[in-house]
Image: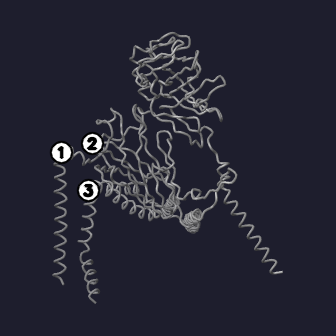
Amino acid sequence: MTSFLDRSRGVLLAALLLSSSLALSFTPWLASKVSAVSGYDNTVHTTETLYTSMTNFYIGGSNKTCSQSSDLSTTLFDGIRTNDDLFIYGDLDMEAIRASLDEAYANGSYSVTQGFVRAPLGNGNGTMEYILLVWSESGDGALNFTGSTPTTTLNAAADDFQFLMIGNRPLAGYGSVNCNLVVTQNFSGYNFPNKVVSSEDQNQTTGNDGFYRETRQVFVTSGFDITYPPGYEGTPIPENELRRRINPSVGYTLFSDGRLFAMGLSTPPCLPVGLTETTGCVSNYRLIYSVSLEDEVLFEQTVDRTEPFNAVLPGYETYQLRVQFVLPSGPVPPISPDVIAMPVTFVLVFDGTGVDGGTIGNDCEVVGDVFVCEAADPYEDCSLLYNYVTIADTTFPLISIESLVCSVNNFGLWLRSTLISLFVPGYSFYQNWYQSITTFFESKLGFLGTSIGFLFNLLGAVVTGAVATSCIIAPPGEIFGTPLVINVCDLEGIIGSSAFTAMQVVIIGVTMVVLITAGVRKYFEVVDRR
Amino acid sequence: MITESILSALSAVVTFVLGLLPSLPAFPPEVQSALNQFATVVGDVVGVISYLYTPTILILAFTILIAVINFEAIYKLALWVYHKLRG
């Protein structure tokens, strides 16, 4: 009977182990199948530069070679505004368009797409190449993902949405345009100006008629507000070079004992002309670091870009580390016509587990005018260590020894942080607990509590005064109806900075001489007495 | 979690027990206000001194001052350690 029970237990255990192993093996595969992936990942295709314009294209029913400028980008803004050789087609109020475009150019609220179409036009293969320029004079332009797989689109929208198309394809049925580029709002029947790019406009096919067709529509740049769909892993939309977002590049290490070390990486912000006295990249900037818990700032420090920031987090909590540029001329304005200088905010989960993080390698995204980086995950991604086996064209992950070790390590980290959170209260708990106890004792002990509180207040004021220097003494009372305020910094302004420094040196020197003399006299006094 | 529960229970017990006793009378608000103002002015004065001396020099000077005032006790302690080390 006993051996039967033993055998049953053995079989049960083996079955349990087998099913667990299978479940573990298939979990990542299943997870990959069911995990949410954005259906818009194939919408955006980009190019860093505008295509070189062709010189051989189709005009009025026949191929023609033009000596036209090969760079479409030269016509984009300055060209549209100043080039009189442009062929304006349609009833366009170019004066109003140019004024509006100036505004959009100044606030960066424009978006540029390049399109290329090769299609059977007229009596042969024709090509069309154009730039789609959309803008918002008021600066409220937005890009939205719409549609559903397989046809997804990036649409531009704005209350004062405007657009132009600039291209080399003469209009259907229109005669020679002397190879000049055409500016129009109705380019060969293309009348979907808000469709900036689309997943369906990336085709290369040969139709039944034997003609080769090719469509490319690629994104060049955008200054419109962008909301990426959840889980989006497609190509990021390139942002305007003109109105660029800059954020400090920072790395940090949070040690398991709460010590925080952060430092700016050696990437100077490159700012457009006009923001600073110097142009180009600024190398002598500083960074403001601040650590806060909920809304309370615990530490704040301004340091040179080459210096590190150090702090000790007081307890197991979720903190925010915020880093912002300070240029020699002062803090960078958050938003200017040329630049959006974003502070970087890191979410730091301090639970006794050491982590490294920063703007590089973290999951960071633009939220409003702040570059927010999620907490660095202390756990290693063990799925990267799986082995894979392919059976009948299907690849299955298999647990490897390394992935098992990785899982055990992760479990150890989890156990540690769980035990710590079980036994060590968070900083805010201590704060609230101390506050409630203090309040209770103050009300209960009456004048005794006030006396003890006064001693603590006095000590706190002395320590704060010693650490955070101040120029102002504001005793209570008034003189001739004016509050009495003594401002020592005014003295520096009156006698001059160098004289003030000399005075400081004299005061410090006299103090040190007096103290050292007193020490020596005390020494001889004590020794002589003995 | 566990420590939080223990501390909360402790404060609840102390609050309950002391809550049974009558409260002592408080200082008049004018006195409390004057004490707070005094602490603020002292803090201001220390801040200005720190501005003149710089925080580092101030802490150094303060340390030397403490050492000078307690020189005899420190001297005795040093001699005691010295004699102990010599055996």
Residue B21 shows in the view: no
Residues flagged by tags 1 and 2 on a common chain: yes
Rendered view: A493 above or below B33: above
For disc 1, the neighbor class at 10 Å (few under 14, some 14 to 19, many from 20) is few
Determine the chain carrying the residue at label 3: B
Q: Position of residue A120 (x, y in %)?
A: 59, 20
Q: Farthest residue to the right: give it.
A: A1
Residue A387 coordinates in the image, percent (x, y): 61, 58
* Residue occupied by mark 2: A480
Please tell me how crowded label 3 is: few (under 14), some (14-19), or many (20+) other residues with Cα within 10 Å.
some
Given the image, on which type of amino acid does mark 2 rest? Phe
Marks 3 and 2, how far apart in space? 34 Å
Q: Residue at the spot x=51%, y=53% of the render?
A: A375
Q: Which quarter shows the N terminus of chain A? A: bottom right
Residue B48 vs residue B12: left or right? left
Same subunit, tags 3 and 1: no
Q: In which quarter of the image is residue A339?
A: top left
Residue at x-position 17% and y-position 60%: A509
Q: Which residue is nearer to you in this view: A179 or B40?
A: A179
- Towards the viewer: A180 or A455: A180
- Expressed as whole percent of the image width and height from the top left, the position of residue A116 reads 53, 26
Three-letter residue code for mark 1: Gly
Which residue type carries mark 3?
A: Thr
Residue A103, percent across and down? 43, 23
- Name the outermost residue toward the bottom: B87
Q: Do the residues labelled 1 and 2 touch (CB within 8 Å)?
A: no
**Marking on residue A496:** 1
Give the Cα distance between marks 1 and 2.
29 Å
- Residue identified by numbered label 3: B54
User: Of the residues under marks 1 and 2, which one precedes in the sequence?
Assistant: 2
Chain letter for mark 1, please: A
